[in-house]
Amino acid sequence: MTAAAPEPDSRPRRRDVERNQEALLTAAATVFASSGVDAPVREVAAAAGVGVATLYRHFPTRSDLVVAVYRHQIDECAEAGPDLLATSPTPFAAILSWVHLFVDFLGTKHGLGRVWDGDAAEFTALHVLFVTRLVPVVSDLLDAARASGEVVAPTSAYQLIRAVGDLVAYAPNDPDYDVRQMVTLLVTGLRQPQPAV
């Protein structure tokens, strides 16, 4: 009697699936930042090194892909805060690095509403996720920079996130506008006492 052949291990395939999904999310973020969320899905698939069919297996609609990228980047921004605080030379340097990462995230977010085919409650849930995940991260960065004496301006994490968002909002439409320069100017202002208005 011969021994039964071992059942194939599904773990390598699962790792391939996870790698493909990660590659698609990373590629889509890059493509959306440069070409907008209306970029052809074949461009995203090519950048990820997979076929279009693989993309559609993971993300059946464009809005599925855009929302997945949005959620993925929220997670990356949230996880980056503590890492930057631990590895940057100063808390202020960590804030500046984090804000530039956030600018990249906002670049991929443009046009989300145009491709969204879900309901309003789901769209609102994304905004709630954005605020609940990122405001505490920025609060921790600001607290550390205040404790080190590097930040003295009285602003909240939410105000800073909102101000950066406003500076980024029109950047794609104006080639003469250097959003990173303006955001750096804004963040550098946190080091200065603010006049009464």
Image (cartoon, rainbow, N blue to C red):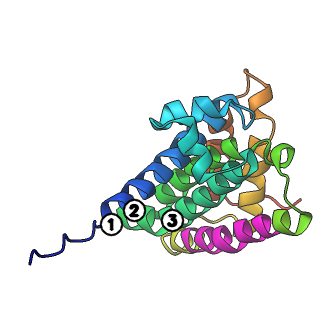
135 above or below 29? below
Element at badge 3? helix
What is the span of residues highlighted in magenta in the rendered image? 125-141
Mark 3–mark 1 distance (CA, rounded to whole Å): 32 Å
Residue 123, image x, y percentages: 83, 62
Q: Say which quadrant the N terminus sits in.
A: bottom left
Most extreme residue toward the front is 1
Separation (CA) of disc 2 from disc 1:
5 Å
Proximity of marks 2 and 1: CB atoms separated by less than 8 Å: yes
Where's residue 10, x and y in %?
34, 66
- SS for callout 1: helix
191 in magenta = no
Residue 6 horizontal side relative to residue 140, left or right: left
Please name which of the two marks, 2 or 3, marks the residue nearer to the observer.
Answer: 2
Determine whether 8 is above or below 39 in the image: below
191 in relation to 154, above or below: above
Residue at 77% over, 53% down: 163
Q: Classify the position of the C terminus by image quarter.
A: bottom right
Q: Which residue is mark 1?
A: 11
Residue 126 within the magenta-colored segment of the rendering: yes
Residue indicated by mark 2 = 14
Residue 156 in view of the camera: no
Amino acid type of disc 3?
A: Gly
The first of marks 2 and 3 along the sequence is 2
- Residue drawn 66% across and 49% down? 65
From the viewer's perspective, tell me whether residue 46 is left or right of residue 156: left
Residue 81 marker: 3
Q: Quadrant of residue 185?
A: top right
Badge 2 marks a residue whose secondary structure is helix
Predominant SS along the magenta part? helix
Image coordinates of residue 87 in percent, x first then y, are 36, 61
Q: Amino acid at mark 2?
A: Arg
